[in-house]
């Protein structure tokens, strides 16, 4: 094959998107596959790669009817290109963050208990420090919060449960024990006797849905005793559960934070548990390995004071 002549290289930086496309050729094995990754046509990809070669004054690809392979020089360049492309992407991200500094928006997801009973205080403290930051709070059960943070749909999440989620990084920011509660007219409220795990597992109960931090803690504690529980109802709202048990026919297990007002008013009664340990930590979670910065980092600092 005839040797392709190249014009002298320029001192300007190469097109970083074209470099990223060239890296994709190396990773996928063909110009066509690289073009599909970038959602452009193969002729458009070929034109960008040719322009990159002219700019650098180096033949990067050996083009044949059977396909394109990297030249020796191309293999050297692709080894250098990765760091440059990553640095360029990081630069663009930081410039975008800087340009939006005056109109910051923080996406937060929190379990229902945390959203209702802890987030209002934390967000008021954040607002006192960063009044220009707009916060979008999405309440969901703990399982869903982990999914939102993992997918990048929330910068910071807050969950409760028996253990740290493996999919994300986390730090303990608070604590909330679970308590067994009933209406004052329930037989357990009248007897005053502690309830065993076996008795609870057989009793009519109204509980949060599987996937919630509350349910995870209860199910795991019962599993230690070889027990499972079949609730009469599963509801996704703490308020709905408290309303459902008010008639006195069923019990529930909820976080102490969510029933403090009712216990103080006497509209619900705490029943002691004989042989169940229902403690749980509240954790802040985030997707990458670095501690959150900017508004997310400030909120994390507020929560851990």
Image: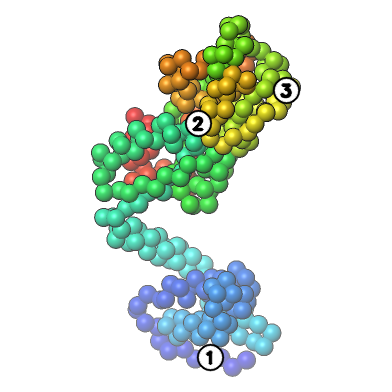
Foreground residue among 117 and 237: 237
Cα distance between the residues tagged 3 and 1: 75 Å
Residue at image coords 47%, 89%: 6
Q: CA distance from mark 3 to mark 2?
A: 27 Å
Circle 3: element type: loop
Q: In the image, which is nearer the foreground, mark 3 or mark 1?
A: 3
Q: How many marks?
A: 3
Which of the two marks, 3 or 2, is nearer to us in this view?
Answer: 2
Outermost bottom residue: 2
Report the side of 222 relative to 289 (left or right): right
Reply above or below: 145 against 183: below
- Tell me the crowding category of disc 1: few under 14, some 14 to 19, or many 20 or more residues within 10 angstroms, Cα based: few
CA neighbours of label 3 inside 10 A, class few (<14), some (14 to 19), many (20+): some
Q: Which residue is mark 1?
A: 4
Q: Secondary structure at mark 2?
A: helix
- Is 85 positioned to the left or the right of 182 in the image? left
Can you say whether 255 is above or below 4 in the image?
Answer: above
Q: Which badge, 3 or 2, comes first in the chain's sequence?
A: 3
Query: Where does residue 259 sit, x and y in percent of width and height?
Result: 47, 23
User: Residue 227's mark?
Assistant: 3
Task: Give the crowd class for mark 2: few <14, some 14-19, many >=20 residues within 10 Å.
Answer: few
Give the mark nearer the N terminus: 3 vs 1: 1
- Camera-side residue of 258 and 6: 258
Disc 2 designates what residue?
Answer: 239
157 lies above or below 274: below
Question: Residue, x 34% and y 29% (percent of image)?
Answer: 305
Does dot 1 land on a helix, a strand or a loop?
loop
């Amino acid at each position: 094959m005839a040797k392709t002549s190249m014009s002298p290289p320029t001192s300007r930086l190469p097109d970083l998107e074209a470099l990223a496309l060239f890296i994709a050729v190396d990773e996928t094995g063909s110009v066509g596959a690289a073009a599909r990754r970038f959602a452009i046509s193969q002729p458009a990809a070929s034109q960008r790669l040719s322009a990159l070669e002219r700019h650098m004054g180096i033949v990067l690809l050996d083009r044949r009817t059977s396909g394109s392979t990297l030249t020796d020089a191309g293999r050297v360049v692709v080894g250098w290109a990765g760091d440059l492309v990553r640095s360029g992407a990081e630069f663009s991200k930081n410039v975008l963050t800087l340009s939006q500094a005056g109109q910051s928006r923080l996406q937060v997801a929190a379990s229902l208990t945390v959203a209702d009973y802890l987030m209002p205080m934390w967000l008021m403290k954040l607002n006192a420090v960063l009044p220009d930051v707009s916060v979008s709070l999405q309440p969901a059960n703990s399982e869903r919060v982990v999914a939102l943070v993992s997918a990048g749909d929330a910068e910071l999440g807050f969950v409760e449960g028996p253990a740290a989620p493996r999919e994300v990084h986390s730090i303990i920011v608070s604590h909330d024990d679970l308590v067994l509660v009933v209406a004052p007219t329930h037989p357990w409220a009248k007897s005053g006797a502690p309830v065993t795990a076996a008795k609870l597992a057989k009793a009519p109960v109204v509980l949060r849905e599987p996937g919630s931090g509350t349910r995870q803690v209860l199910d795991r504690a019962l599993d230690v005793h070889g027990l499972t529980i079949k609730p009469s109802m599963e509801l996704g709202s703490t308020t709905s559960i408290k309303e459902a048990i008010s008639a006195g026919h069923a019990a529930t297990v909820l976080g102490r934070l969510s029933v403090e007002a009712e216990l103080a008013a006497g509209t619900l009664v705490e029943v002691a548990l004989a042989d169940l340990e229902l403690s749980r930590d509240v954790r802040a979670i985030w997707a990458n390995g670095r501690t959150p910065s900017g508004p997310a980092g400030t909120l994390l600092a507020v929560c851990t004071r």
